[in-house]
Image: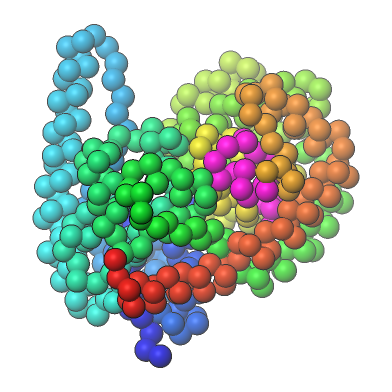
Amino acid sequence: MRPLHLTYVTHYAQLYGANRSLLDMALALRRSGAVVPHVLLPEKGPLTDNLTKEGVPFAVVPFAPWMSTRHYEGRPHHRLDQYFRYTRQAREHVTRNRAAIPAILERLRSWGTDIVHINSLAVGVGEGLVRSSSVPVVWHVREMPERHYGMYLEAGRRRYGRVLSSASRIVAISEAARQDVKRYIRADKEVVVVPNGVFTLADHDSWEAELQGRRDARGSFNFLIAGVIHPGKGQEEAIRAMAIVGHRYPEARLWIAGAGNTGAIRRIIDSLDLGSKVALLGHRDDMNELYRDTHALLMCSHSEAFGRVTVEAMAHGIPVIGRAEGGTLEVLDQGRMGLLYSNGPEELADRMALVLADRAEAQATGTRGREHVRTLYNIERCADTMLGIYRSSLSSPA
């Protein structure tokens, strides 16, 4: 059977969760001989560096998102001025995306594209591709933009829903993400849940020795929270919980990994005198190095659609304490594969204290989680499922 030519469209060039998942899946499908991948994105960055290294063709065509954050402050006339500025920005996004469509369509033709795979709800040229592309469009739901990030849908909710409903297929990374997008689209539009593939089976099995090394380690006990610095990710909650736990357990430390504006959380760290207990590590391309010295992961995101780092940590045998909502509930199997909390820093601190007080049970939780995710979240399974969706979109396009 002839391999399918896929064009993946992503809205940014960093190697955060959505693009790491895209790259893993595209390379796995290429290794299988089933897919010839290409990538289209608005700028160069770490992702294009990796694409070049792997020999995956890509093209840069500048386009804009069709959602944004809006923050109003000041007196009424200040807010009115901000409203008009945001409105102008939204119109500029529309103009830029319309101008990009001809170049994108020409690139699809030159690559012999059979299917377009839009990698995020934020991809602003998705509307133009759904309307203008002559090939099926698969749209990947990897986030809950309003609930998680507080994003403003510049096209409006109705138009946003109509565009998504017109895609050939909609794929969501979790049941939570599926339920969220169903609020916007046609009631009869199917959304298929395909959990992210986070590791290869070979990688998973190679981490077994590292698990034993962590069990034998002595010294500080390291909690890790990883993700872009954003209020929705819960870094502040983790810091305030550490302030409670640190008095009782002096060996406890909190590592915060992720890019973004750290000004607000630095001020909180200073105000709580936690400079010796909380470390800001910045963005890490290779999280595996951190996992080797991490004893427990905190997933404090509000309305997390999936939580790639949750699965990564579990695959490394690391126990997870997660907020009881969104995709975190699914990954932790309603609390059977980790600890859950829901009522702020105090309850989170209680869960952290449980892990510190009973290391043997924490290790057992990590082992159960490791066995649980091996089958469900491997890259091979995700790639195989997506290949079936691609082929079905060709045989019965929407």
Quadrant hosting residue 368: bottom right
Residue 88 vs 368, above or below: the answer is: above
383 sits to left or right of 279: left
x then y, percent, for residue 205: 72, 69
x then y, percent, for residue 62: 21, 55
Q: How is the image coloured?
A: rainbow
Q: How many marks?
A: 0
Which residue is rendered at x = 84% and y = 50% of the image?
364
367 or 279: which is nearer to us? 367
Which residue is rendered at x = 39% and y = 77% of the image?
391
Residue 229 appearing in the image: no
Residue 247 appearing in the image: yes
x then y, percent, for residue 90: 18, 38
Residue 165 drawn in magenta = no
The quadrant of the picture occupied by the C terminus is: bottom left
Residue 315 drawn in magenta = yes
204 or 184: which is nearer to us? 184
142 sits to left or right of 184: right
x then y, percent, for residue 242: 69, 26
132 sits to left or right of 275: left
Residue 363 vs 87, above or below: the answer is: below
158 or 120: which is nearer to us? 158
Q: Residue furthest bottom?
A: 1
Q: Residue furthest top?
A: 75
Which residue is rendered at x = 15% and y = 58% of the image?
100
Residue 256 vs 97, above or below: the answer is: above
Quadrant hosting residue 213: bottom right
- Numbered range of the magenta stretch: 313-333
Q: Residue furthest front?
A: 188
51 sits to left or right of 228: left
The quadrant of the picture occupied by the N terminus is: bottom left
